[in-house]
Amino acid sequence: MPRSIQLHADLAVDPAREAEAVRYFETVYRPTASGFEGYIELQLLQLRAALVGSAPAGLNYRFSITFSSEDLRLKWVASDAHEQVWRTFETFLTRHQYDFLLFEII
């Protein structure tokens, strides 16, 4: 049986559009993702402090999405719905280079 997976991405949300980005995430992005098979959780984490070391330059949010399997996450990513909500969400970002880190939940 496959283990659940979690994808993380560090984001640079435009401070001038922060409230708008969070509202879009909560009212459009998360509800859209939650309708897909295998969806478990989606969070937008706001950076408060780097307690040890330093945060990547420009990072102010981390995106985290959890699916019951990588195959089901990939179906979400390949969907027209994902393409639409991600494209809109990107308009709130000041940087479009991403590190996507995929974790298996143990």
Image: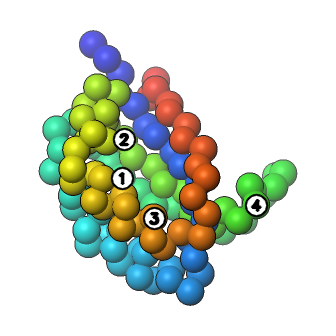
Residue 39 sits above or below residue 88 on the image: above
Identify the mark nearer the N-term, 3 or 2.
2
Asked if the residues shown at circle 3 and circle 2 are in contact, with their CB atoms under 8 angstroms apart, the answer is: no
- Is the C-beta separation of discs 2 and 1 under 8 Å? yes
Viewer can see residue 47: no
**Disc 1 target residue:** 42
Label 2's element? strand
Amino acid identity at mark 3 = Glu
The residue indicated by pointer 4 is 57
Amino acid type of the residue tagged 2 in the rendering: Thr
Mark 2 and mark 1: span between their CA atoms?
6 Å
Q: Secondary structure at mark 3?
A: helix
Which image quadrant is residue 96 in?
bottom right
In whole angstroms, how far apart are the C-alphas of marks 4 and 1?
24 Å
> In this view of the protein, can residue 71 be seen by the observer?
yes
Residue 7's x, y, as percent? 46, 40
Q: Which residue is mark 3?
A: 90
Return the disc, 1 or 3, that comes first in the chain's sequence: 1
Q: Quadrant of residue 46?
A: bottom right
Q: Amino acid at mark 4?
A: Ala
Distance from Cα at disc 2 to Cα at disc 4: 25 Å
Q: Earlier in the sequence, mark 2 or mark 4?
A: 4
Q: Amino acid at mark 1?
A: Leu
Residue at the bottom extreme of this rendering: 16
Circle 2/circle 4 CB separation < 8 Å: no
Q: Are marks 1 and 3 in contact (CB under 8 Å)?
A: no
Residue 66: which numbered mark, if any? 2
Quadrant where the N terminus is found in the figure: top left
